[in-house]
Amino acid sequence: MADEFLFNILEKVLIKVTSPSIENLSFAWGMKSELNKLQNTLSIINAVFLDQNEQKTLNHQAKDWLHKLREVVYDADDLLDEMSTESLRRNIDKKHGKTLKRVRNLFSCSNPIVFRFKMGRKLRNIRNHLDQITADWRKFRSSEINPSNLIGIEVREQTHSYVKASEIVGRENDKRSVVEQLILENSTNAQDNVSVLPIVGLGGLGKTTLVKMVYNDVRISEYFDLKMWVCVSEDFSLKQIIEKILRSTTGERHDHLDMDQIQIHLRTVLDSKRYLLVLDDVWNDDRNKWTELRDLLVNGSSGSKIIVTTRSKKVATITGTVPAYNLSGLFEDDCLSLFLKCAFGRDNDFHPKLAKIGKDIVNKCGGVPLAIKTLGNLLYSKTDERQWLQIRDNEIWQIEQKENDILPILRLSYDQMPSSLRQCFTYCSTFPKGSEIPREEFINLWTAQGFIEDEDVGDQYFNELISKFCFQDVVEAFDGDIVACHNLVQDLAQSMAGDRCSSIKIDSTKAISEGTRHVLFQGEDSQGKQVPEYLLKTRKLQTFNYSFKVGPNDKNFVKTVSLSFRCLRVLSMNYLQIVELPKSIGKLKLLRYLNLNDSPNLTSLPRSICKLVNLQTLSLINCENLQSLPKDIKKLVNLRTLYLTSLQQNLPVEKLLSLDSLQIMLLYKCSCISSMLPSSGFQVFSNLRVLRIYDCPRLTNLTDSMKYLSNLEKLWIWNCKELDLSLGTDVFMKGLTSLRSLMLMGLPKLLTLPEGLKGNVASNLHYLLISDCQNLRNLPDWIHGFTSLVNLYIEHCPNLLPLPEGVGLLSAKLKITGCPLVNVNGYA
């Protein structure tokens, strides 16, 4: 499998090499000619491999060639980032009036001459390596390395309608629900005579098996005059699908007919019959193609039904005329029953110790039947406890998979992704398994690695992964935002990432590739332990995700990381026990994402952290003893996301003057903050889109300067006991003309909604949640002005009086709970 990141990073490097900052430096340093040569060579290689993202099998020679290419392209990316950083640093120093001091050490990298010489030498080395790689390709381009010979296409086997009912575990309730829905005489949402029921679920979850059970149910056979089963898969050819429908009906082939003849024949077959058509494994999300097929299927009598099975929510939305049936995982008891049946056969003669290990194995499978079968079948007839423990303690992606096992099936979903989305998906292997990951974190990490450029693209990619069922247990907020989700198919992500991403335990002795770029370093307790020697060999790491419940006690651990991995873009080190960070953190000049969450002893950040001019995300959640932000924090001109817990009494506006790139801010457990910025403070944050203020017990009021937040889309305030929104909010609220989502939660001093919402703000608001406001008495009469409201949730406000009549005029979904004085039925 070729590196999924390679072909995307090639294009990224080509963009960087022509960027204005690189252009300016190349002229100043006399490197223009060398950079032009680099660009030309990369352009040739990119053109050759532009369409090679579907490579499945490579011989040894091809793998070696691609490995060499991969490493030098990454080196080029690092070099260009170093040059861009130097250009940015100089501009910042110039902006803040800093003059270059005389460099005492002639050979220091701070010396511009030394730095220029160093960059020139690196550039020439990269050029020489690329020239050699290009020469090697030309030498054997007519052999197996030829890109056209590297492409392999995986085709899923056709499904059929037969099922052995005795082999199915745990789907009786699902079957009953679907059958009852199908035999309803009338469907209120049916188009013409036919209604379409999508059944949606992850690959391997059992959609096809469920539909087979339904298809063969005696009530279905009695209700429908005609039943047809068609496996669609990736190729949504209208003519082929109609041929398959006719063949399922008559058993005859019709591929000798032209399109007009075949559609006439289809309409004749369906005429006046109440039919059930199963379209299994549908991938097409082109609405026009679906509409064209559906228009040919409306000739049946009333009550005809179509079942569409799909992995994609988008496909379900396009095809369905009734709400989709979302198939979930099996219950725990059913999972264990299925596993034991696969592992021990029908005899169920198993050893209690093995059964106990089997229960642990089942927990790895997330309720997915195919995963359970895969691991159960691997252990069939094996009675050696060591073999069972090996499967339990291993990762699924490391276990040999047969053609119809879980990973090959899930791989089909992966193959449908565009190349740019694949690299975002495979990067998920760097997250701790089973952890809750906020949507924002996905997007911030993808941005830090250069996979995406902005929030909008990140939202699109995240939604696509959700729709493809790459994640389960999605937690939604009242406004539809994904607060967090659990990663389900991380094994697939790891399998596809190959040696680019590695998950390492603290006590592991396994060797990892020197070309590894992204590492998840995890365990329970790392006290007294240092970074393993074998890991220090991977000098070109771009991600170091450190996940321990107890972190190192001294600064040496962090110092080793910051001095050893100079190419890091992402550094995540939670649960640190240290009081201060080492100054060496400033050496990570390519760093874009820094997470120091849950480090309660951390009291200060070194000034050197302000040298991280590329930093986009700084997360300091639950750093409860952090005194303040460094003086030169204003130099972090690329900072987009700031999550902050500190002991500051207010945000120091003089330190934040240059942070006009900031888009997301969270103030969490800032126990000493009593007021927001001074009167002009928020004018700095004119690009802020999201502001969350959580658990700030001394905060008494906001500030008029929030009127400058004209781009603010989300304002969530939670558990601020002293905050009084009736003080001075009329002015600033009127300026929040882009506000779409407002949460007011845990505010005992909230008596009614702020008057400042009235007018333009109210008419643009889409989502409003009011919760745990013990003294809220009434909603204002002007509530009818929330004309764009989609969701209005009011929860646990025990003193809220009956709502004004204007609520009845709203088209919003209204949810009222825990408000005993409000007649909920009156607003149903």
Image: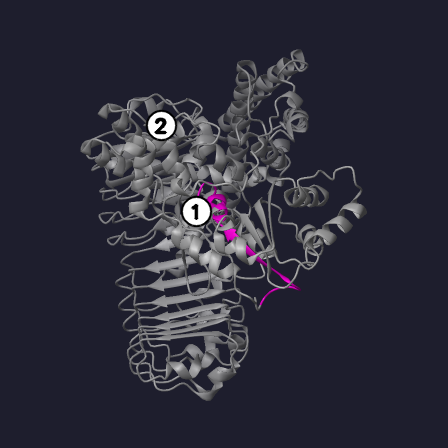
Q: Residues within 10 Å of mark 1 (few under 14, many from 20)?
A: some
Q: Position of residue 739 (x, y in %)?
A: 50, 68
Any magenta on residue 356?
Answer: no
Q: Which residue is located at x 62 percent, y 49 percent?
A: 285
**353, 761: nearer the viewer:** 353
Element type at mark 2: helix
**Element under disc 1:** strand
Q: Position of residue 742 (x, y in %)?
A: 44, 69
Rendered location of residue 388, percent (x, y): 27, 28
Using the image as rendered, state which of residue 531 and residue 443 is in the foreground.
443
Q: Residue 715 falls in which quadrant of the image? A: bottom left
What is the number of the mark on residue 252? Answer: none
- Residue mark closest to the camera, 1 vs 2: 2
Label 2 crowd bin: few (<14), some (14–19), many (20+), radius 10 Å: some
Q: Nearer the viewer, residue 297 or 816?
A: 297
Q: Looking at the picture, does residue 478 appear above or below residue 256?
A: below
Quarter where residue 699 is shown: bottom left
Is residue 200 highlighted in magenta? yes
Residue 456 can be seen, yes or no = no
Give the image's coloring scheme.
Answer: one colour
Q: Is the residue 585 above or below the residue 193 in the image?
A: above
Per the rendered image, the range of residues in magenta is 189-212
Q: Is residue 683 left or right of residue 579?
A: right
Marks 1 and 2: CB-CB under 8 Å?
Answer: no
Residue 822 drawn at (x, y percent): 35, 83
Q: Amino acid at mark 1?
A: Phe
Residue picked out by circle 1? 471
Residue with the mark numbered 2: 378
Distance CA(mark 1)–CA(mark 2): 25 Å
Q: Which amino acid, by three-letter code, is at mark 2?
A: Leu
